[in-house]
Amino acid sequence: MSDFLISTNPLNNEEVGRVPIASQQDVLAVVDQAKRAQTVWAQHPLQQRVEMLTKAYQQLEPLHPELTRLISLEMGKDQRRAHYEAGGAMANAPYMARETAEAFEPKQIAVSSQIQYQPLGVVGLISPWNYPLAMANNLLIPALIAGNSVVLKPSENTPLVADVFVKALQQQLPEGVLQIIHGEGDVGRMLVQADINMIAFTGSVAAGRDIMANAAGGLKRLVMELGGNDPMIVMAGADLHAAARFAVASSFENAGQMCTSTERIYVDHRVADHFRELVVQIAGQYRVGGWNEPGVNIGPLVNAKQHQNVLAQLQDAKNKGAEFLLGDADYPLPFIQPTVVDGMTPDMQLEQLETFGPVVAMSTVDSMDEAIRRANDSVYGLGAVVFGGSGAAEVADQLQAGMVSVNGGVGGPGDSPWVGAKHSGFGYHGSAEGHRQFTQIRVMNY
């Protein structure tokens, strides 16, 4: 390894730290070590792997403050949310390890026949920057408990938090079972093209297509969450105060940099005026600033490129006649102020694309048929929500998404899959069925 990947603080563009960038030779050597380690790791009984991984996660407990700090410094997340993400990864690991192991227990289908869940081999895990611990964690645990070895390529925007995370776990895991490589998209592509058996990825549709193309030659298994453009429908019978609170909170969470952020809101014309007033009132209470400033609930966007992407969508909306009820279409780096846009139309980028910024985008509709049609008129299908009274469930049932909710956020309780429809997902994770995608199913007849 020679060149270095420099991680910068989006708040002031100062260097946070640096890690070595993996070369082609480095990637091949890491994968070769992972292959050798996997054969030994898979020989450990399932419950022993659970115990070893649970013990490894205990190494993270004294690192909670450092992981929190790095999440905030590398991607701008406010300290409260960063603390919760780091703590959640640690707290959830023992439960998730046990839950995953239960999914991998052999299933007896006849007196002399079983369905068994065998490891695939080496899993390449490519994780995103917006939840650098949580998203890596959700894929890492089932991959390792299944008996696979893992090579993690974290986002180039958040390499340091991933480096601390992996090196802590490595202290308790057998050598080579979990490794990390750093770099930008070209390093991820090297990993996908290497002699591995599966790629688990969270990121953009464009990157997902590239991964599929490069994985095709080896017929490698894929589990990919590819973002969303989540719609929200507000019916005439909705609790408008609850709907407005959800709309703003969902649109602004993590500075809008969340795959299940509410991106498009379709409001029944009979309640549109009141709903708009409530949204503006609530949105106006949000404050932007640095991760360590008191009272801040919207941090900087992760980098200048993402900042410009949001501005381009806002300017496109302004040029096409949208009304800005709060904010404007031009903000200096590194923040996007709380923004509320009304009059969104199907030809606007705000309706067509994933925004990934703190923007509430609304449109008034004359009927639920129009709302459903526009909600479904997207290549994305991760989440969708409906706020309403009578008839809300019937509207929700017509939405084309992997996760749909009435009067609340997406994502089911307990052991529910995290799943997207259409271009938002290829395979899925979470739940027993999701965990099993990290395995090779084998029918054994005795």
Image (spheres, rainbow, N blue to C red):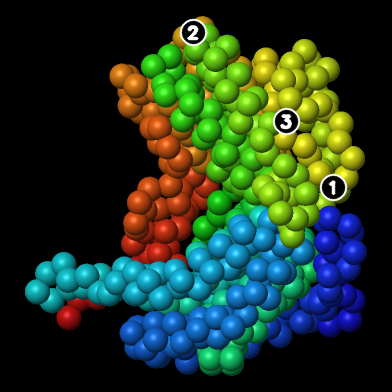
Relative to 126, does residue 248 appear above or below in the rendering? Answer: above
Q: CA distance from mark 3 to mark 1?
A: 15 Å
Tell me the CA gap for discs 2 and 1.
Answer: 38 Å
For mark 3, does the 10 Å Cα neighbourhood hold few (<14), some (14 to 19), or many (20 or more) residues? many
The residue shown at (61%, 31%) is: 282
The residue drawn where x is 58% and y is 68% is: 86
Residue type pointed to by label 2:
Arg
The answer to whether residue 421 is seen in the rendering is no
The residue wearing badge 3 is 339
203 in relation to 95, above or below: above
- The tag earlier along the polypeptide, 3 or 1, is 1
**Few, some or many residues within 10 Å of mark 1 (<14, 14–19, 20+):** many
Res. 294 in view: yes
Check disc 1 and give the amino acid type. Answer: Pro
Question: Based on the displayed image, in which of its 4 quarters is residue 116 positioned?
Answer: bottom left
Residue located beneath label 1 in the image: 334
Relative vertical location of residue 361 with respect to residue 296 in this rendering, above or below? above
**Residue underneath mark 2:** 270
